[in-house]
Amino acid sequence: MYIAFGNRVLDSKDIKNIIEENTEFKVIKDMSKGSKREDIVAFNLSVSIDILNEEIEESININELDEDSLFDEYMASTEELGFELEEYLPEDSIIDFKAYKWEPSDNDIKAVLVMANEELGYNKLKDVMRRLLTQVE
């Protein structure tokens, strides 16, 4: 889908490729159309638990955590990785990123990324994130 991005047009497929080639995230679905806006790029993403375990084990022994604590660690680590996406995205972009679900059957954590041109502002980005999270939950 083509997105109005400042004074230029981006293809959400190009952003998808950047994410998949440079990060550990897999794009499950392009949610840009579901944002009901022409200036938002949005994706439903997943990251493998195995990758998160490697990250977490650098500072914590996973075997000592109960399920609730492990869930919290997975969500926090996913969001840390999510905000690192910014370095691969266009310089004039702003993002919001939320991890929302641990999916043991897929062995991954699901998340939503919303990206827009910085001119749009964080408040509008947060509104779009709230709407998209209701679509995926």
Image (tube, rainbow, N blue to C red):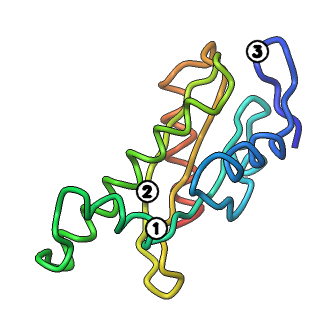
Q: Residue at x 41, y 55 (%)?
A: 78
As helix, strand or loop, the secondary structure at mark 3 comes to loop
Image: 5 above or below 105: above
Observer-nearest of 14 and 57: 57
First in residue order: circle 2 vs circle 3: 3
User: How many neighbours does mark 1 have within 10 angstroms: few (below 14), some (14-19), or many (20 or more)?
Assistant: many
Mark 2 touches mark 1? (CB < 8 Å) = yes
Query: Which residue is disc 3 drawn over?
Result: 6
Percent x, y of residue 127: 52, 36
- Label 1's element? strand
Q: Secondary structure at mark 2?
A: strand
Q: How many marks?
A: 3
User: Residue at the location (52% across, 59% down)?
Assistant: 134
What residue does disc 2 label? Answer: 99
Gap between marks 1 and 3 measured at Cα? 31 Å
Q: What residue is shown with label 1?
A: 109
Residue kind at label 3, given as amino acid type: Gly
Q: Position of residue 84 (x, y in %)?
A: 48, 38
